[in-house]
Image: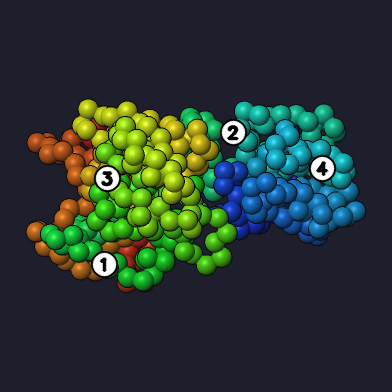
Amino acid sequence: MTVAADEPAMQRALELAARGLDGTDPNPRVGCVLIRGGEVVGEGWHERAGEPHAEVHALRAAGERARGATAYVSLEPCSHFGRTPPCVHELIAAGVARVVYATEDPNPLVHGNGVAALAQAGIEVLGGVLAAQAQALNPGFFRRMQTGLPWVRVKLAASLDGRTALADGESRWITGEAARADVQRFRARSSVILSSSGTVLADDPALTARAPGVTRQPLRVVLDTELRVPPEARVYGAEAPSMVFTASGDAERRAALRDRGVRVETMPRAETGGLQLPLVLRRLGELQANEVWVEAGARLSGALLRSQLVDELIIYLAPSLLGPQARALVQLPAISALADRLQLEYRQVERIGEDLRIVAIPRPGPGGG
């Protein structure tokens, strides 16, 4: 079979993988389809970390019909013992004749080893089928395995003239119900929801994922240089895990947060007075965070952009105008030449209810990311 002929089955494997969008963290989202004699004999996807992988679910569904079948897997089958046994052993034992995978696993414990084990067992192996789509489904996993850093999305909600709140801070609600529900889906798929002490003090958000069917709550992380946020804040509630990065050595406040179940870690100050953001993200990567969803004010959003730490901007634009006295979208330094502007590239524009959702990435080069 040619690569083109393998694409429909791989597309199905990717659709199955997407069913694990909010449950597999910190593992990748993976789907598997088993086909024998032109018939689908088994399907599966990785549902939650610590549970069977996609290949195992598909093999269980197929039973003896897996022998001689072709397995379509959206990621190179794993070859190491983790929380579950290696999938290559399962595929070999089941007697599959051929394995088609979308992309190699970036995990150095697996990378290329799964393919080698299958080939050594006499199984025909083909890779690179719909690789870009498979990587796009797991941007944070690939980024973390390759660089140690998570994939960072910054969420912004604004009026059409780029204002996020009135001068007195009132902002509920600029965008509509559909856009707010869309935000919940992004929260649910993320490893971390990151915010600032200023935003938490102003709005007292819970920062939980409230999308239908959510089975895992992301880690809520607050950047609080001076530990200004009180332990009673909703973001430190028991419904989801919480963590704070701080430069403060106040032992009493740190102890009060720990008593509340909050993880407290020290982070060096930046020259600007806040925390060193590259180190924050590096630490989140060490904690196996794949995707970081940022919901914060103009200051932190602007600082992340200036530091070239943003991978995607998710911007919700409401069909309204708030005027020049309202608060700006992000805080960026003044420029004297257009060549110094921060340039973005639109990746997607979609209507969500009455609002627009714009997905943009910082453009590399002068003034870009």
Report the amino acid beneath label 4.
Glu
Q: CA distance from mark 4 to mark 1?
A: 52 Å
Q: Quadrant of residue 60?
A: bottom right
Q: Earlier in the sequence, mark 4 or mark 1?
A: 4
* Disc 1: CA contacts within 10 A as few (<14), some (14-19) or many (>=20): few
Does residue 143 sit above or below 2 in this rendering? above
User: Comparing marks 1 and 3, which lies closer to the viewer?
Assistant: 3
Report the amino acid beneath label 2.
Pro
**Residue 138 percent location from the top left of the image:** 54, 45
Circles 1 and 2 in contact, beta carbons < 8 Å: no
Q: Is 249 on the left-hand or right-hand side of 34?
A: left
Residue position marked by numbered label 1 in the rendering: 172
Q: CA distance from mark 4 to mark 3?
A: 52 Å
**Residue 77 percent location from the top left of the image:** 71, 39
Q: Tell me the residue at 33%/41% (across/down).
A: 253
* Helix, strand or loop at mark 2: loop
* Helix, strand or loop at mark 4: helix
User: Quick one: 78 or 240, which is closer to the camera?
Assistant: 240
Residue position marked by numbered label 3 in the rendering: 228
Q: Earlier in the sequence, mark 1 or mark 2?
A: 2
Residue position marked by numbered label 2 in the rendering: 106
User: Quick one: 290 or 194, which is closer to the camera?
Assistant: 194
User: Comparing marks 4 and 3, which lies closer to the viewer?
Assistant: 3
* Disc 3: CA contacts within 10 A as few (<14), some (14-19) or many (>=20): some
